[in-house]
Amino acid sequence: MAAVRDFQELIGQPVDRLDLATRDAVVGKVVALQIYTPSNLALQRIAAIGDSVQECAQQLEAAGNDPLDYEFSRLNPPFLAR
């Protein structure tokens, strides 16, 4: 994925598999990942992406999901600058 035109294209992608250009484009965005439990064996794939937790929760609800079943993380740069 060379350039992200629409962040919704990233839904279903694992965060750790994003290429560097894509990862750099989403720095500061919030992603929702389904909470892993032994009963659901959730894959760590992006379920929602936005500028805030509230925006992600709205996306999850619109898709018929319960936001309480997800964890929210702000994406940091792929490497720390020294």
Image (cartoon, helix red, strand yellow):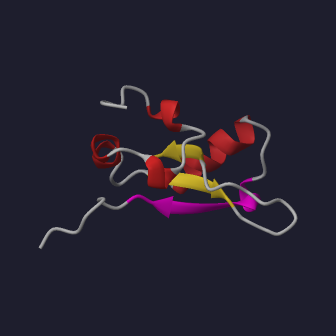
Residue placed furthest toward the right: 39
Camera-side residue of 48 and 80: 80
Residue at 59% from the left image edge and 53% from the top image edge: 32
Camera-side residue of 66 and 19: 19
Residue placed furthest toward the bottom: 82
Instruction: Give the image location of residue 39, x and y in percent.
Output: 88, 65
Instruction: Give the image location of residue 52, x and y in percent.
Output: 48, 52
Residue placed furthest toward the left: 82
Q: Is the C terminus in the top left, top right, bottom left or bottom right quadrant?
A: bottom left
Instruction: Give the image location of residue 8, x and y in percent.
Output: 51, 32
Specify whether 52 is left or right of 54. left
Range shown magenta: 67-75
Instruction: Give the image location of residue 60, x and y in percent.
Output: 69, 44
Residue at 73% from the left image edge and 42% from the top image edge: 61
Q: Is residue 14 visible?
A: yes
Residue at 41% from the left image edge and 46% from the top image edge: 18
Residue at 41% from the left image edge and 50% from the top image edge: 29
Specify whether 43 is left or right of 4. right
Q: Is residue 51 visible?
A: no
